[in-house]
Amino acid sequence: MSAWPSQRAPWTARAVAVVLLWIARTLASLLVACPLVFAIVGSGLVGSPERDAPLFRPGALVLLELVRTGAPLLGAALRVSLVLFALCAVLGLVPLGAALDLLQRQTTDAVGSRFERGFRLFPRFLGLSALTLLAQAALLLAASLLGTALSSGLHGRDERLLSLLPVASFGIGLLCCAWVGAVLDIARSSVVQHDVGARAALFEALTILRADPVAVLVGSYPSVAGSAFAWLASAWVLAKINLATPVTRGVALAFVVHQLAILLSVALRVRWLDGALTLAARAPSAGD
């Protein structure tokens, strides 16, 4: 295998896949935010002509008052939003399967047929995702225990080093979780490429990882790092937008910045998924 896949999907297929996943993520984010928005509106503190502008004023007095008086309502809305987030994360595997099918087959099939394929792939994708979540949780737990053990073993040393050890161990755990996610994407691509079960796809992904670890681990890095940069940059820009005035221009600008961050992260992810499909096609079992 080469260090990085050379056969890529046409730019039109990647563009359609980006739009498909972008729409899915945008709708999911709006759905998750709805309970909290309704709770804030129902509190009565944003019913003035200034709307929600007082919530963003310096001092955050109105925001603190909202939290104090509307804590039960906000708590219930937060629980509903968490349930909707989990549901959207699970159902998001369907458009992901449709996008992978689009990148893999590159035919002029209707969108409905793509989603039909996504629904057929859904059970196997769900099983792979569950295994990945367990592995990532175990890695984060191990990183936390390692940081605690190192801090205890080096007790009495430099305090700055002791304070950095848990952060460093947690960062290593997050990096390992990203690599596990890359193996998950290879397994999903194997399901799409070879129409195999979740277990066989996972074994194929591990085989690819053993045969060409650079392509798997380094290939997914631009997607993870670029997405993190997009969200950090959007957070920095949002902090510069003045939302403390009753003008819709600031809210509209904040929405545009949020959408640009989603679009960039989705575009980078589609680029990696295209490479993952090519890696899966080069698996030893691909020619059987």
Image (cartoon, grey):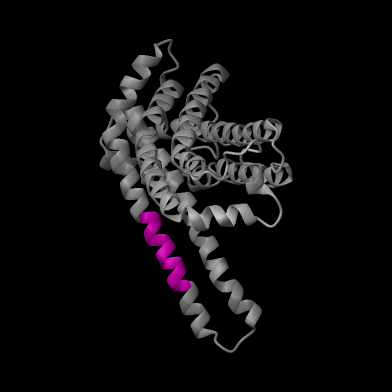
Percent position (x, y) of residue 88? 39, 37
Instruction: Look at the image and tell me in which quarter the C terminus lies.
Output: top left
In the picture shown, does residue 284 fall above or below 134? above
Percent position (x, y) of residue 182? 46, 44
In the picture shown, does residue 12 fall above or below 126? above
Snapshot quadrant of residue 158:
bottom right
Snapshot quadrant of residue 48:
top right
Q: Which residues are magenta?
A: 135-146
Residue 75, can we see it? yes
Which of the pair 25/122 is nearer the observer?
A: 25
Residue 137 in the magenta stretch? The answer is: yes
Q: Residue at 52% of width from left, 31% of height from top?
A: 270
Residue 96 shown left or right of residue 119 in the figure: right
Q: Residue at 55% of width from left, 87% of height from top?
A: 155
Residue 188 shown left or right of residue 159 in the figure: left
Q: Residue at 66% of width from left, 46% of height from top?
A: 54
Residue 287, can we see it? no
Single out the residue that lies furthest toward the bottom. 156
Which of the pair 248/262 is nearer the observer?
A: 248
Percent position (x, y) of residue 276? 46, 35
The secondary structure making up most of the magenta span is: helix
Snapshot quadrant of residue 106:
top left
Residue 45 in the magenta stretch? The answer is: no
Percent position (x, y) of residue 248? 67, 31
